[in-house]
Image (cartoon, rainbow, N blue to C red):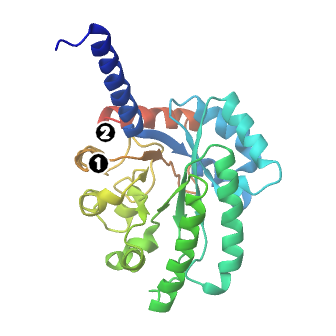
Amino acid sequence: MRKSPVLLDRRAFILSTVAAAALAESKVNVGAHLWVFAAKQPGYDPTPVLDQVFGEIGQAGVDGIELMHFALLHEGAVERIKDLSSRNRLPVIGSSWSANLWDRTRHADALAEVQTVVERLHAVGGRTLGISVGDARRKKSEAEFDAQADALRRIMKLCAGHGVVPNLHNPVYEVRDGEHDLNGTLARIPEIKLGPDLGWLFRAGIDPVDFIRRRGRQVVFAHLRNEKADGKWPEDLTEGVIDYAAISKALHAVDLQGDLMIELAHEPTFQPTRPLGESFRLSRDYVRRVMNY
């Protein structure tokens, strides 16, 4: 029986719509973390310069912004951030957050704070939470890893209720000593998602490409920063010795489904030669050209 053109057209429309939706869902967003602005503020709280942050990053051609949790803790934060996001056409993708989760005596305060952060992050449209679990400045004990995992499970449940995806962010302490800290967490919560900082991996002596090959199926988020041959941070992502072309091949090989976040960092005495927004724009162009994202 010959099918009518109407039915064929309808089927083609449905298939094309499904394909378009799948493509949209698989898009890798390239955003910017605001650390380089916050680094100059007391207590690393970017709140006093949020207007500058959204204005400059909003002109850099990125897909969105990652906050630091301090910006979400102030009274009126949700309304202000939503207004800045709307006026600058810069969606909030997520926020970073840190606490000493290995210390069970601090759980009550940490969990109360992260509840506020997640609720407000959801309210401003964010959907990712990058978690740093805290540096004990030594190898953590098995009991401390147990405490860390208990807190993370509770945070994962909280995030699930607000449409937020938590991921483990790795400062150097989490991946030094053969990834001791990270392995301690994954032994207890093997399903948790990862959000590595590729620059911190490099600084810790971990090859980012090898890390992605080994753990890439769990990676849903990554920070992009570069490092010069002398071990110092460059002005933007285009300078440095980290092989982002090889990193790109590794990310594409594991079919990254998530977000890449440009995170610029400068040495304390460094004086920028251009507006920070321009450095983000140059970095965004670099990611497009070198990493094909």
Q: Which part of the image, by quadrant, shows the C terminus?
A: top left
In the image, taking residue 121 as reference, residue 149 lies left or right, namely: left
Residue at image position (45%, 33%) is 282
Residue 256: x and y, percent? 33, 47
Q: Nearer the viewer, mark 1 or mark 2?
A: 1
Q: Quick check: marks 1 and 2 in contact, CB under 8 Å? A: yes
Q: Residues within 10 Å of mark 2 (few under 14, many from 20)?
A: some
Q: Which residue is mark 2?
A: 291
Residue 111 lies left or right of residue 65; in this view the side is: right
First-in-chain label (1 vs 2): 1
Which residue shows up at 42% across the image and 61% down it?
Answer: 193
Determine the residue located farthest toward the left in the rendered image. Answer: 1
The outermost residue toward the top is 5
- For image coordinates 25% across by 63% down, the residue present is 214
Q: Amino acid at mark 1?
A: Leu
In this orientation, which residue lies closer to the viewer: 178 or 275? 178
Q: Is residue 61 visible?
A: yes
Secondary structure under the numbered disc 2 in the rendered image: helix
Q: Which mark is residue 251?
A: 1
Give x and y (percent) for residue 238. 38, 40
Residue drawn at the location 44% of the way across and 37% of the way down: 283
**Up-down: is 140 above or below 178?**
below
As helix, strand or loop, the secondary structure at mark 1 comes to helix
| Local crowd size for mark 1, using a 10 Å CA cut-off: few (<14), some (14–19), many (≥20) | some
Residue found at the far right of this picture: 75
- The quarter in which the N terminus is drawn is top left
Regarding residue 44, the answer to whether it shows in the image is no
Position above or below: 120 against 55: below
Provide residue 168's location: percent of width, then percent of height.
46, 64
For the residue marked with disc 2, what is the amino acid? Answer: Met
Q: Give the distance between the C-alpha atoms of the residues marked 1 and 2, in whole angstroms.
A: 9 Å
When the figure is inspected, residue 209 is found, relative to residue 139, above or below; the finding is above
